[in-house]
Image (cartoon, rainbow, N blue to C red):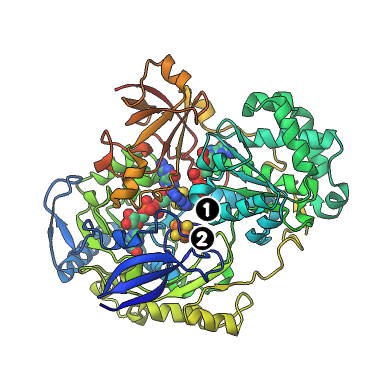
Amino acid sequence: MTTTIRRSVCPFDCPDACGLLVAVENGRATSVSGDPDHPVTRGLLCPKMIHYEETVHSPRRLTTPLQRIGNKGDGEFEPISWDRAIELICSRWRDIIAGHGAEAILPYSYAGTMGLVQRNAGHAFFHKQGASRLERTICSPAKDAGWKSLMGATPAMDPAEIEQSDLIILWGINAAATSIHAMRDAQTARRNGARLWAIDTYRTPTCNAADESFLIRPGSDGALVLGMLHVIDREGLLDMEFISANVLGFEELASEILPDCSPARMSEICGLPVDVIERLAREYARAKAPFIRLGSGLTRYGNGAMTVRTISCLPAAVGAWAKPGGGIFIGTSTGGAFPLQTVTREDFMTGMPRLVSMNQLGGALTGLTAPPVMSLYVYHSNPASIAPDQNAVIRGLEREDLFTVVHERFLTDTARYADIILPATSSLEHPDLYRCYGSYHAQRCSAVIPAVGEAKSNREVFCLLAAGMGWDEPFFSLSADELVELLLAEENPWRDADVTERLRLGEPVMLTPLTEPKKEWLTPSGKIEILNVRETEQLPRLLPTHAERDGYPLRLQPTTTPFALNSSFYEQDELRSKQKCMELLMNRGDAEARDLADGQTVAACNDLGTVRFTLRISERVPPGTVVTEGVWWREFIPGDRGVNALTSQRLTDSGRGSTLYDVTVEVRGA
Ligand SMILES: Nc1nc2c(c(=O)[nH]1)N[C@H]1C(S)=C(S)[C@@H](COP(=O)(O)OP(=O)(O)OC[C@H]3O[C@@H](n4cnc5c(=O)[nH]c(N)nc54)[C@H](O)[C@@H]3O)O[C@H]1N2
Ligand SMILES: Nc1nc2c(c(=O)[nH]1)N[C@H]1C(S)=C(S)[C@@H](COP(=O)(O)OP(=O)(O)OC[C@H]3O[C@@H](n4cnc5c(=O)[nH]c(N)nc54)[C@H](O)[C@@H]3O)O[C@H]1N2
Ligand code: SF4
Ligand SMILES: [Mo]
């Protein structure tokens, strides 16, 4: 048997877009390893991907189109041909458009694959159709909004500078699970003498790897930072030279906001003792080059954007930006590197159809009128599991008059409600071009194995649907590879001719931001705008979370696990067994006060729903907080609802993001 080694890219929603080396025998992937020559991967893959071949060739893969024969949600289907499936979908859509208009069709997609072509494959189709538009804001738009408020369009610093820092703060990021290469680089810095801190709401694996970790109340980072800034100001630890040359509005912050933010007062909000807030302030200000890597969990609150704005004041106050290794990293944005509109084709739109928030899918399916949503087309997303307010989403998916199509690799909780299921390729079966949000690299790849069963890629399906709708627009006969070529057609300042050629050949390359990070501030004033006159709240200040007004006694944190990615990877038995089961971690005191025992089934409830978990008494969780990791498939959980039956459709203060972490519950025996 001959084995060939083919290059590919990890397609998942992760900051790193790893380079993969895939061993292929007889058209099957037999093993996967990290590309040692990739600038970020450097040979290291996370636990999720070391057996990607088991996902790709899983016996659970969907291999033919399916039509529903049972009740919605039951999961009973019979195979049909692709021709029949496309015909059923297009004829139903023609009827819906005739009866209600095209806005009655709603696409739902997110980040099952991050490749520029496959991820965005539906945009051109739905723009031409005139369907409702989806506002794709479930992940971290509040983080971007908070950063932009202070920093405008300033590009992210090079995350590799972490190795030059002497004080690294992993802030609201479970890097040991979600950013393993940043974790590796932080550990390298630590071996060279840097200190490593983690700031979180419970003891994550990242906390365990840090020199010190600081556990605060959910949504209270703003209070911690304002307390630190109060101390830094009071004790004369500001970098006045940096501030006067680079910062707008520090004086206003110091005179209008900080006086009310004594460590004593902030301690009551964030839960850290006064002396700890004072020590954090002093050590941060005195560090040579403090580096903050900011996660996304802490932004999914009613005050999430303000939290990011407030934390972003720290490096400005102490002049960390002026030092190699100093600053704050929230994620790269390489939007200008490739002309994405050649794939998304906004020019196909003839009007401006309504925008529906993906965070409010439940409300849209159950409440929208003029027109109601009559058809939902889901691809590379699993909203029945990952979207907030699961009970509302499922009430919508159960509607007999809703025509639901799901294009998927697996029979997900969403696919169970479909009228038609279409089988999707995995990333090893289709070509694409990838960039990422944790670094400046990009890489193109080809299909390395043939499609499993009758699976088709997102791009192929939209071409079939376009033909089924009777459109003769030539764009819909271009292959995914031809679209990649369009994305690479002209070099631009992000990538010169040499980089573009290497991209064509499938090598990982580094893109170059248009302006050098940390050298100039791309804001209207040219300074870091702590005072931003364009905001309703012109200065960073304390804002409440939503949950503070809800009144259930425990704060729920629905966080990530190293062994899954959102609801992906539950098909791998080994990875699932590492997570054991859908657990609720609770402090011993909280459990004893409720007479709950380790290992028993409990019910967590609030106004939105009730969810069963297996209780795990854990000293990793402080009093008043409960934690569950991962987004489990329904077939593997104790009850019939996942964690998102407890999360709400409320949005963030800015950016219209999800507030998945801004939740309160009560827990009782079940
Ligand atoms: N293994 C794995 N990797 C992943 C994912 C996954 O599910 N699993 N998901 C991918 C995706 S889509 C994303 S967006 C990223 C997310 O990457 P991260 O931002 O690292 O993910 P989260 O676990 O959502 O949040 C990080 C941490 O914030 C903490 N936190 C919650 N609220 C607060 C708060 O108010 N203050 C502070 N200081 N901390 C808080 C949580 O307890 C959690 O440990 O990871 C990506 N990578
Ligand atoms: N409780 C809770 N809820 C969360 C989160 C959390 O941490 N906790 N995280 C939130 C965040 S940050 C995010 S970004 C969202 C993520 O939400 P989603 O983007 O929906 O992520 P996944 O759950 O990974 O589902 C992706 C689906 O795409 C399918 N897929 C993969 N590749 C392809 C392909 O090429 N074509 C097609 N058609 N399908 C494909 C996979 O099989 C998988 O079922 O979830 C959010 N929801
Ligand atoms: S999920 Fe992230 S860390 Fe894991 S292989 Fe993919 S890109 Fe790399
Ligand atoms: Mo995300």
Disc 1 C-beta below 8 A from ligand 1 = yes
Residue 463 is at least partly visible in this image: no
Depth check: give the residue in front, 125 or 658.
658
Which residue is found at the position 86% from the left and 51% from the top? 244
Q: Residues within 10 Å of mark 2 (few under 14, many from 20)?
A: many
Give the percent coordinates (x, y) of residue 291. Answer: 69, 50
Q: Which residue is mark 1?
A: 179
Say which quarter of the image contains residue 122: bottom left
Question: Looking at mark 2, is its residue's CB closer than 8 Å to ligand 3?
Answer: yes
Which residue: 41% across, 53% down? 47
| Image spot of residue 247 (x, y percent) | 80, 51
Looking at marks 2 and 1 on the same chain, the residue that comes earlier in the sequence is marked by 2
How many angstroms separate mark 2 from mark 1 (CA)? 7 Å
Q: Name the secondary structure under disc 1.
A: loop
Residue assigned mark 2: 16
Say which quadrant the N terminus sits in: bottom left
- Mark 2 near mark 1, Cβ–Cβ under 8 Å? yes
Which residue is found at the position 28% from the left and 74% from the top? 25
Q: Quadrant of residue 548?
A: top right
- Callout 2 amino acid: Asp
- Which sits in the foreground, 98 or 631? 631
Rendered image quadrant of residue 255: top right
Label 1: few (<14), some or many (≥20) within 10 Å?
A: some
Q: Residue 478 — which label? A: none
Residue 473, x across and y down, in percent: 34, 80
Q: Please say if 631 is above or below 256.
A: below
Q: Amino acid at mark 1?
A: Ser
